[in-house]
Amino acid sequence: MSKTIAVVGATGNQGGSVARLFASEPGWEVRGLTRDPSKPNAQALKSKGVEVVAADLDNPVSLVEAFTGATAIFGVTDFWQFVSDPKNHELAAKTGKPINEICLDREVAQGKNLVDAAAKAAEANPAFERFVWSTLSDTKKWSKGKYVNNLHFDGKASIDDYLKETYPALAKKTSYLQMGLFLTNWQMMGGMIAPKKQADGSFVISNPTVAPHKAVPWVHPPHDAGEYTRALILEQPANKTLLGTSGPMTDEEFAALWGKTLGVKASFKPMPREAMEQMVPGPLGAELADTFEYQREFGYDGGDPEVLMPKDCGVHMDKLLTPEQYIKNEDWSTVLNSQAA
């Protein structure tokens, strides 16, 4: 008898990868959750045999219905979608509340809805096996209060706490996936942190860091999230935390690899956090600066000794997309053909 995995955000970066992988996994059926099943991405999943259902993280009833009967659930929330919503910026201007705090509140509310629904589904189904929650480390905890603006990390970490405190039975069947630093982040905010061409034709990669020699866990979620989730469900017992990465390397190593792969000269130059805060004025500038500095000083996982690397969790390492492969496959024409900074 087949098992069913319900996948939140099935048309997104992480959920899409999970849905596609389990659609080809023997003995598994996939129920993909999306707000709009009529979209092309949803139709593409249907063509792979995925059952696509309408569900919304702001609608708890829809989540309970979508999770009913599932053997496993993959859950994820998205802080940055709220940053992109003009209505949240209007609310920030009207109330005086920082935009990142508004986005934090929205994400945490959705995360709690997701956990509440997963708990109901797990309680109603004796055959329920695993809840995989895509989370991030607790910045305030692991930095001992040094970094307090990294809210897109801390919001997810607070949902971890909510799950464990409110639903101990579900917590016993939960595994945690900390997705590493997205290789696509250079595209964010109009290419703000993309490699910059210099007058001599070379390129400089720059971001705020206090430890440029500390390895960063690079990852390409659309390709690899499914592999990590497969390992947490099929290879590991519950209550494991996996750091999703295909190639940890320092900023300096990444810049060198980027240049070598594309046949150009490239280097890394630390950026003062004040420069980031000037590039992105207001709370989001402080958010991003804290993010980069926290990752480089304390580690992406904060130095949590319980976090495991993919090679130690049964992940098929040969199926992951390495940073070098990503660089080769990506279209860098807007960067390579840009004017010198």
Image: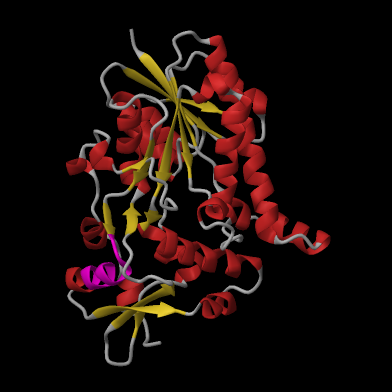
Screen quadrant of the C terminus: bottom left
Q: Is residue 52 left or right of residue 327?
A: right
| Relative depth, front residue between 1 and 234 | 234
Q: Is residue 222 visible?
A: yes
Q: Is residue 340 left or right of residue 62?
A: left
Q: Main secondary structure of the magenta part?
A: helix
Q: Residue at x 60, y 21 (%)?
A: 64
Report which quarter residue 235 is drawn in. top left
Place of residue 43 in the rendered image (x, y in percent of width and height, measured from the top left): 43, 33
Q: Is residue 136 above or below residue 250?
A: above
Q: Is residue 167 above or below residue 193?
A: above
| Relative depth, front residue between 114 and 85 | 114
Place of residue 288 in the rendered image (x, y in percent of width and height, measured from the top left): 53, 65
* Scheme of image coloration: secondary structure
Place of residue 94 in the rendered image (x, y in percent of width and height, measured from the top left): 82, 61
Report the magenta residues as a range.
249-258
Q: Is residue 310 left or right of residue 157?
A: left
Screen quadrant of the N terminus: top left
Q: Is residue 56 visible?
A: no
Q: Residue at x 57, y 54 (%)?
A: 140
